[in-house]
Amino acid sequence: MGHGWEGVVLKLFRGRDFTFTVTGTEQVTDRYRRVRVTDGGLLAATGGAHPTMWVRLWFEKDGKPHQRAYTLVDPDPETGTFGL
């Protein structure tokens, strides 16, 4: 899936792609679910976690790319995992 013109802009800013794998979920409230993932090498490539670190995820709907930003929760650089 391409990222459209937003992806082109991110590449100009040296944005990189990483593939995350969902390893579990946690229902935090009735309307909020935390998703645990492996980082696909993100934390190692960025030198570890930063206090306000976030990621941009891309989704396809009706053949068009859409993006959402999520803050990392409980990142663990040693195991390469975090929550969203």
Image (cartoon, helix red, strand yellow):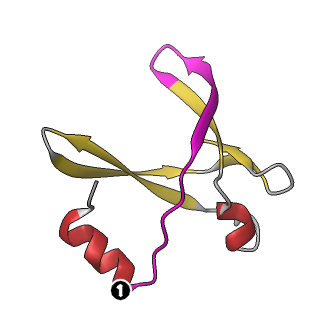
Q: Is residue 46 above or below residue 14?
A: above
Q: Which residue is mark 1?
A: 12
Q: Is residue 61 visible?
A: yes
**In percent of the image, x 26 and y 60: which residue is there?**
2
Residue type (three-letter) at the residue carrying disc 1? Leu
Quadrant of residue 27 within the rendered picture = top right
What x and y, as percent, mark residue 80?
76, 52
The extreme right residue here reads 78
For residue 43, side relative to residue 67 (left or right): right
Q: Is residue 51 visible?
A: no
What x and y, as percent, mark residue 81?
73, 46
Q: Is residue 18 above or below residue 5?
A: above
What x and y, as percent, mark residue 58?
35, 51
Magenta residues? 12-32
Q: Quadrant of the C terminus?
A: top right
* Residue 66 is covered by the magenta coloring: no
For residue 21, side relative to residue 65 (left or right): right
